[in-house]
Image (spheres, rainbow, N blue to C red):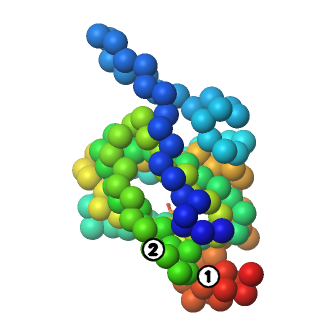
Amino acid sequence: MCVALARIIELPRLEDERGALSLIEAEAHVPFEIRRLYWLYGVPESASRGAHAHRELEQVVIALSGGLSIVLDDGAVRRTFELNRPDRGLYVPPRVWRELFAFLPGTVCLVAASEVYREADYIRDYAAFTREVTAA
Ligand code: TYD
């Protein structure tokens, strides 16, 4: 897979004088069946997370509050995305190295994933990742 498949997904935003509501509905807003949700919070500004690729798992990452940067790397192309809106998600395809960094204070980052947690799906070593993607 490649970074070119990554994209910002605009989620519905229903807004009136009572505030705003956004949503993700099965089979409508993300290009996979969601099998897991997790969220990152309390991340120090100096910390970075991720630093891995997945062999099969796909994700959509949403900054529910605050903001962060995500760099995606497929071994050939690197692209950085800024996430700072609760009505936008970043689709991250499989076989892409990702690092999440520059978390603003108070950031809550929701991740919708296509698989349950399975350590065997992770590639946590960058050299091993580039070997695997160039071999494919
Ligand atoms: P890790 O993958 O290092 O987090 P990140 O990529 O966001 O930096 O996960 C941190 C720990 O949490 C690690 O011990 C694995 C565990 N974990 C689960 O048990 N289930 C999960 O769904 C996730 C995402 C992580």
Q: Quadrant of residue 44?
A: bottom left
Q: Residue at x 65, y 32 (%)?
A: 28
Q: Residue at x 59, y 53 (%)?
A: 59
Q: Residue at x 47, y 38 (%)?
A: 10
Residue 107 visible here: no
Distance of mark 1 from mark 2, alpha carbons? 14 Å
Secondary structure under tag 2 reads strand
Answer with left or right where residue 43 lies relative to residue 133: left
Residue placed furthest toward the top:
17
Q: How many marks?
A: 2
Type of the residue with mark 1: Phe
Q: Which mark is residue 129?
A: 1
Residue 82 visible here: yes
Residue 65 rendering spot, x and y as whole percentages: 34, 40
Residue bearing mark 2:
78
Secondary structure under tag 1 reads helix
Answer with left or right where residue 60 lies relative to residue 66: right
Going from N to C along the chain, the mark reached first, 1 or 2, is 2
Determine whether 99 is above or below 85 in the image: below
- Residue neighbourhood size for the residue with mark 2, other residues' Cα within 10 Å, grouped as few (<14), some (14–19), many (≥20): some
Residue 99 rendering spot, x and y as whole percentages: 45, 68
Ligand 1 shows up in which quadrant of the image?
A: bottom right
Determine whether 22 is above or below 64 in the image: above
